[in-house]
Image: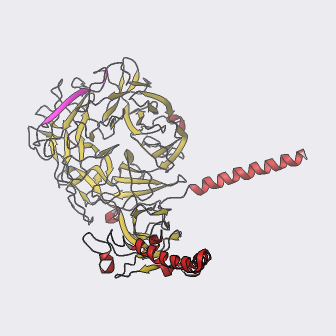
Amino acid sequence: MRKSLLYFWNFALIALLGAGLFALNQARTLRAQTVAFQNSNSSCEQENVLCTSASPAPFSCRDAMSIACKNVTGGADFNGDGFFDCATANSHFPNTTGADLDVSVLINTGNTGPCTGGVVDQFNASADYELVYSDTTQGIDLGSIVVGNIGGGAFDDLAVPSGENSNSPSSNKMVTAFSVAGGGFGPPGAAPTSTAEADWNPTPNTVIGTPSIEGQRNAALLDCDGNGTLDAAVAGGDSSIDFYTLNIMLNDGSALQDVLPGDDFDTTIPFDNSSPNPIMNVAVADFDGAGGPDVAVAVSSNFFGPDTIAICLNNGGCGYTCSQEVDVNSLFAPQQDLRMSSIAAGDFDGDGNADVVITTPGLNGTAGNEVGIHFFMGDGTGNLITPGIHVPYQPTGRGLPFVLTTGFFNNDDADDVALSYEGGLGNSNVGVFVMDAARTVTTTTLAYSGTNPVVDRGGIDAVDLDNQGCDDIVSLATEEIDRGTFIDTERHAYVFLNDVETMSAIAGADQVTDLETPTAISGASCTLSPDDPGAVLNVSWTLSPAVGATLSGADTLTPTFTATEPGAYTLTLNCNTRCTGDTTDTKVVTVGAVPPPFLPGDTQGGCLASLTSDAGKNTKWFYAILLLAPLAFFLRRYGRKGAVLLVALTAAASWALPARALTTSFSVNTFEPTVDDSEYFT
C-alpha cells in the first residue's frame, strides 16, 4: 500500500511539473523576426554636411562623431514643435587658428512623407556651436553628448562631458547648453546663449578612463532619485586610487551640480592597470526590477587587457553599488584583445527583464570568436546570465562593429538593436538585430544611399522622427567624393525611416439584446497593413454610458456585454500596435424598448395635462356616500342581518372582478402612463 502511494505521488509530481512546463512554453509566444525600412532598406537621405554654418576660419569644423536624439525618458525636442531633434558632438582637438565648433544641432523639419530616395530633408541644415570651458583655451576631447530637459525650461537641452587631452589641462567638465525662448540655442557659429558648467569627476586631471572621441557613450541622463529632474551618470577613472568610477551629477532642478570627491554617489569599479587608456561606456535600465534606473558600465582596453561589465544597482536615492562584474574576455579565451567599443541595454527577448548587448570588434574571426555583437540576458535580480548569445556580424569581411543603440523597429513590443558598422574594405552600413522570445536573433543590413562610397564610423541613435509609431535610425558616416586629383570626404547624418504601417478598426454592426442577458459582441476586427503575422495587436473597448452595463473581456475582439438598465450603449473599439497609432470604431448595443428623450420645456399634453395635485380631492367623499347609502337602506329595511348580507355580497363582488376594472389608462402619443385610482378606496 505504501509503495502504491509512493508511485501515485511520483506520478502526480511529474504530471504537475509537465503541466507547468507546458504552461511556460505556451506563454512564450514567438514574435515577428523581421524589420522593414522604406526605400528598400537603404537610407532615405544623406543630410547636408555637418558643421557648415561658420566657415571659413577662424572656426574649425571637425567630424561629428557622437549623436544623441533621446534619453531614457523619450526623444529630444529643442524647439517644441512635437518632432524629435538630434545633436552631435564633434571630434575636438586643439585649434591654433581659432575656436572649434563642438556641437551640431539637427532640427527635425517634421517631414512625414514617404521615403523615396535622395534628399528628403528630415532635418534642417545643422546649427553649429562652440563650447567654452573655463580652465582651458584649447580644445579638449569630447566623447558623448546627452540630450533632455536639464534646466526645467520649455524645451530640451544638451550637455557634453569633456575628456582628457595631452595638449591641454583636462577639465573633466560637463558643459550644458540650455535652450532659449522660442527654441534652439541662440545664433549658430558661436557659443550657445545660455550655458552652465560643472565638474563630473571627483579628482580632475587624473582621469584614465576617458570618453572616446569616436561616438561611444560614457555619459547618460537619468532620474536616479525619482524627483522628476534628469541627473547625469558619467564613467571615468582615477589613477591615484586605481579605480574606475561611476560618477553621478545631481540636478537641482535648474542645472547639473558638481560631483563631490568621495561622496556617496561615486561607485568604484574594479581597475586593472594592465589596460591602458580604456574606453568607458554606460547603459541605463532597471536591472533588478526595483524601479531603477540602474547603470551598466563597460570598461574595455584599446589595445590589450581585460574587458569587463559592471552592473551598478541604484538604492532609489542615487546610491549605487556594483553588484556584479562580468569578465567578458574569459568567454572568448584564450583571446584577450576584445576591444568592447559599445554597450546598450533593453528587454530584447520580451521577458520583462533588462538585458545588455556589447560589440566585439577585436575578436580574431575564428570559430566561436567571430567579430559581431554579444547579448547577455538579465535575470531580473541585477545579474547577467553568462555565457550569453553571440551573433557574428561582419558583412564586408574586414569591417568592425562600432556603436550600438536600441529602438522599437517592429510590432513585437520588445527592444531591438541597431549598430553602426565600419565597412573596412567595403561600404559602411547599419545592422539591425531583432530577437524573438526563443532568443533567436535575425539580422538585417541597411545600406547607405548615394553613388559614392560611404566609409568610416560614427555614432548612431534611434527615435521616431516622423511620428508614425516605430523608431527610425540616424547614423553618422563619411562620404568619399572623387574630385579627380584627390578624394574629398564629407560627413553626413544618414536617415533610415521605418516602414509606414496602417491600422484599421471595425467594431461590427449594431446589436440588440435584452436585460440581464450576457451577449457576445461580434463582427469586430483589427487589421494591420501591410500584414505582419508576428505583430502584437493591442485591443481595448470602452463603454458609454459607463453605468447600467458591464463589458468583460474588454481587451479582446469578442467581449461579453451585459446590461442591468435599458437603453442605448455605445461601444468604442481601439486598435493599435507599437508601430501604429490608435484607430477607433464604434457600434451601438440597444437594450429593451427605449422611449424618446423627454426634453426640457415639453408638456405631457392630452388628459394628463389636466391632472393636477388637487385633482380628485373630493372623490373619497363621493365613494363614501355611495357605499354608506345602500348600507343604511339595508340596515333599516332588513335589520342587522341585511347589513351583514350587503357586506358579504360586496366582498364577493370585489373578489370576482379583475383588478384592471378599477383602473383607467390614458394614451398620449407613445407615452403610456397608467393611473391607478385604487388609492381612492383607502
Question: Where in the figure is residue 277, as x and y percent of width and height?
Answer: 36, 28
Residue 511 seen from this side: yes
Residue drawn at x 26%, y 41% is 147
Q: Is residue 634 above or below residue 179?
A: below
Total count of labels: 0
Question: Where in the figure is residue 249, as x and y percent of width and height?
Answer: 31, 29
Q: State the image quarter where residue 241 is shown.
A: top left
Coloring basis for residues: secondary structure
Q: State the image quarter where residue 623 is shown.
A: bottom left
Please, what is the dominant secondary structure of the magenta stretch?
A: loop
In the displayed structure, does residue 539 sit left or right of residue 100? Answer: right
Question: Where in the figure is residue 108, as x and y percent of width and height?
Answer: 21, 53
Q: Farthest right residue?
A: 1
Q: Is residue 447 above or below residue 320?
A: below
In the displayed structure, does residue 92 sit left or right of residue 657? Answer: left
Q: State the image quarter where residue 598 is shown.
A: bottom left
- Nearest the camera: 518 or 51? 518
Q: Farthest top residue?
A: 240
In the displayed structure, does residue 544 sit left or right of residue 255? Answer: right
In the displayed structure, does residue 86 sit left or right of residue 297? Answer: left
Q: Which residues are magenta?
A: 188-202
- Nearest the camera: 657 or 604? 657
Question: Where in the figure is residue 45, as x and y percent of width and height?
Answer: 25, 59
State yes or no: residue 65 in magenta. Answer: no
Residue 371 seen from this side: no
State yes or no: residue 189 in magenta. Answer: yes
